[in-house]
Image (cartoon, helix red, strand yellow):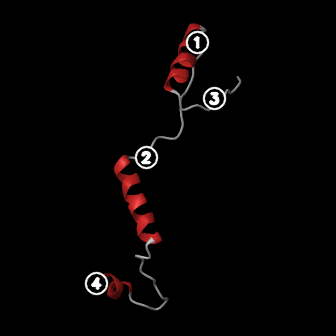
Amino acid sequence: MATLIINTESQEVIEAVKSLLKKFNVSYNISGEKAYDPEFVKKIKLSEKQIDEGKVVTYEPGTDIWDILNTK
């Protein structure tokens, strides 16, 4: 058995390869990275913006984290 890895984000290419493999009776598995949930991406981008603007909380060792959270 051989492994063939195809790197593409094009759905057209994926469908063409799947069709070709089916015609040759070749079994295949599709795996890969899934896109992140758009709401999650939005939250991450907001957090990065807040960091750039200096809207951060600094934690000093020995400080009670609940004191920091309750003052915000």
As drawn, the label of residue 20 is 1
Front residue of this view, candidates 57 and 49: 49
The residue sitting at the right extreme is 2
Q: Relative to residue 24, is residue 69 depicted above or below?
A: below
Q: Can you identify the residue that label 4 sits on?
A: 70
The N terminus lies in quadrant: top right
As drawn, the label of residue 36 is 2
Please state the horizontal and vertical placement of residue 51, each as a whole percent of the image.
45, 71
Front residue of this view, candidates 5 and 72: 72
Q: CA distance from mark 1 to mark 3?
A: 14 Å
Residue pictured at 42% horizontal, 77% vertical: 56
First along the sequence among labels 1 and 3? 3
Q: Helix, strand, or loop for circle 1?
A: helix
Q: Helix, strand, or loop for circle 2?
A: loop
First along the sequence among labels 2 and 1? 1
As drawn, the label of residue 6 is 3
Residue pictured at 35% horizontal, 85% vertical: 68
Q: CA distance from mark 2 to mark 4?
A: 31 Å
Please state the horizontal and vertical placement of residue 21, each as a whole percent of the image.
58, 14
Q: Quadrant of residue 8?
A: top right
Q: CA distance from mark 3 to mark 2?
A: 21 Å
